[in-house]
Amino acid sequence: MYRPQIFILVLLISAFMIACDEDPVAIDLQVPATYSFERNGQSSVSYDGQTERIEQLTQIRSVLNDANSGNQVSGQDLLDMYANKDGNGGGNFDFTSTKQLKDKTFLGDQAAFDQLLTDLGNASIIGANGDTAVDGSIGLLWRGNDPSRSILVDEKGHEFSQIFQKGMMGAVIYYQILSTYMSDARVGDNVDNTTIEDGSNYTTMEHHWDEAFGYLGVPVDFSSNWPSDRNGEAKFVGSYIRERDNILGSGDIIMNAFKKGRAAIVANEYDIKNQQRDIIYTELEKIFAASAIHYINAVLAASSDEGERFHTLSECYAFIKGLQYSPRATLSISEITQLLKDISDDNFNFWNASVIGLNNAKTTLSTAFGLDNVKDDL
């Protein structure tokens, strides 16, 4: 007897088996060896604005180093550089630019950085007098009792220079990469990836991805096992990717994710693009956490050297605080605040930092970021 149900079932099973036998369509991404992409024989990559901001931060750092050396500096000059007054930092930059650091800083922290630079200028008057810092008083401390390695700290022992520099790495660089340029609003699947922008050679999605890469501060051929004679080419966040690379291997991981993600954008393969974006979020957060652990280890090793301890505590403090700027932050604001108290005290005073608190912070970070196996090696 003819039974149509059985016949249909047989057809379905046959179709399923045939489909299973077919090889999946291979996705042929053109992933370059370096972060270099072209359209019609011309580069389609542009991130000049990011490069200019990194150079501005580099030149601000020189002024901060002057203050550390016991020289008086102008807080107003620093404010002018931070906001890039008149396009040349109020005459303090050796180049002109329409870009600035201040308007790319996490909005909730802009006033705090203004105040920090103002306070630094005032503190440098005390530093120029050669006053030694003590608990509750601004002054200089010396790393390793070396008179050529002084640092200027506030009344809580926070080194102005490191709080600002590492603060910019968090509140500008890390924030802009993860909260701005890697966001759905900038590189999500619905962002224009068809129209070539007027006067340019890239789509909107391509350009936003490139701008995120530009904030890394690394050359286009950056990789793991970076040669020591080229260390200076990796700047700010890029330099910390390099420093943590021997343990985390993040250099290749992050570079490959940026290159493969950009290639996926060109090929309109958004699933692959989003997978690479996930890797970037994870690895950059791990860099910040691992760097904080590294500095906790350094503080514990320098227990009798106040200058070295407060220098490294300042770096640690800023890296921990920076963890808040990712929209996918592993730790909550309250957890981050507790970590900052663990490495100091309830008033964030480094003079009261304890071995117990530092080890608690180290354990919290290593557990949260899967670094227990390497926490003592960082």
Image: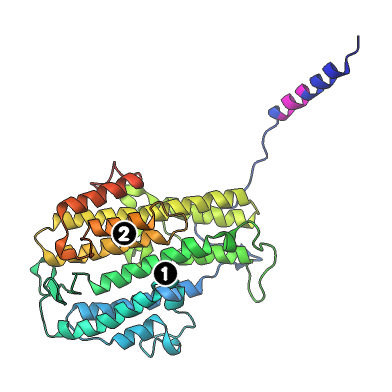
Circle 2 is placed at which residue position? 337
Which callout, 2 or 1, points at the residue further toward the start of the chain?
1
Mark 2 falls on what kind of element?
helix
Query: Dividing the image into 4 quarters, which one contains the N terminus?
Result: top right
Q: Position of residue 300 (x, y in %)?
A: 16, 54
Q: Check disc 2: other Cα within 10 Å, few if <14, some if 14-19, many if 20+.
A: some
Mark 1: amino acid: Val
Circle 1 is placed at which residue position? 172
Q: Position of residue 316 (x, y in %)?
A: 27, 60
- The residue nearer to you, when weighing 275 against 83, is 83
Mark 2: amino acid: Thr
**Residue sitting at 41 percent across and 51 percent down?**
330
- Residue 91 lies in what quarter of the image? bottom left
Q: Is residue 317 magenta?
A: no
Residue 288 badge: none
Q: Is residue 251 visible?
A: no
Which one is in front in this view, the residue at disc 2 or the one at disc 1? 2
**Residue sitting at 69 percent across and 63 percent down?**
194
Segment colored magenta: 13-19
Q: Is residue 103 visible?
A: yes
Q: Is residue 17 magenta?
A: yes
Q: Is residue 197 left or right of residue 207?
A: right
- Residue 242 lies in what quarter of the image? bottom left
Q: Position of residue 315 (x, y in %)?
A: 26, 64
Q: CA distance from mark 2 to mark 1?
A: 19 Å
Toward the right, the furthest residue is 1
- The residue nearer to you, when weighing 282 against 61, is 282
Q: Position of residue 332 (x, y in %)?
A: 39, 54
Q: Is residue 183 left or right of residue 128?
A: right
